[in-house]
């Protein structure tokens, strides 16, 4: 089953969920702010992102800037970064799509199509 974490005010999330529906891909939509991915889900996503922790962060978000993560993220351990992400869904790049075989942050139709269809 496809899990996709989204935010209702996010245009990319809307495009992604519309694409999933148009392609008749069964999925569960989860509000990322209210229910961020678990540390285990974030670890799984990290493997799909070649262990590049920064790819999981919404670097253009207000919370990222407010917390000064541009400067402090490089000094955080992986465990600290994952704990921070799992406690604040605003920090996570979205949409955040996870299956047993793939994981995507952000919506690029060609990438999603190449794996999901």
Image (cartoon, rainbow, N blue to C red):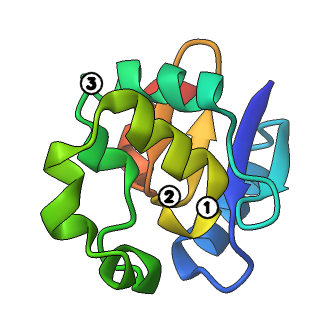
Question: Which residue corresponds to mark 2?
Answer: 92
What is the crowding at mark 2: few (fewer than 14 residues within 10 Å), some, or many (at least 20)? many
Say how many tags the image has.
3
Q: Secondary structure at mark 3?
A: loop
- Residue 15: horizontal and vertical position, in percent? 60, 70
Residue at image point 52% right, 60% down: 94
Residue at 48% across / 38% down in the picture?
A: 82
Q: x and y percent of residue 2 in the render?
A: 74, 32
Q: Quadrant of residue 101?
A: top right
Vertically, is 115 above or below 92? above
Left or right: where 41 falls relative to 35: left
Of badges 1 and 3, the one in the foreground is 1
Q: Is residue 105 left or right of residue 78?
A: right
Locate residue 53, reporting x and y percent: 29, 39
> In the shown orientation, is residue 3 left or right of residue 114?
right
Q: Which residue is mark 3?
A: 51
Alpha-carbon distance for marks 1 and 3?
20 Å
Q: Nearer the viewer, residue 103 or 16?
A: 103
**Mark 1 vs mark 3: which is more N-terminal?**
3
Report which residue position mark 1 lands on: 88
Residue 7 vs 89, above or below: the answer is below
């Amino acid at each position: 089953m496809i899990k996709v974490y989204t935010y209702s005010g996010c245009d990319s999330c809307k495009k992604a969920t519309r694409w999933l529906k148009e392609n008749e891909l069964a999925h569960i939509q989860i509000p990322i702010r209210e229910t961020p991915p678990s540390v285990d889900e974030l670890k799984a996503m990290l493997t799909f992102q070649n262990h590049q922790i920064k790819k999981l962060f919404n670097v253009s978000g207000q919370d990222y800037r407010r917390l000064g993560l541009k400067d402090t993220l490089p000094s955080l351990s992986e465990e600290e970064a994952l704990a921070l992400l799992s406690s604040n869904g605003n920090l996570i790049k979205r949409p955040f799509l996870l299956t047993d075989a793939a994981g995507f942050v952000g919506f690029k139709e060609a990438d999603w199509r190449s794996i999901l269809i």
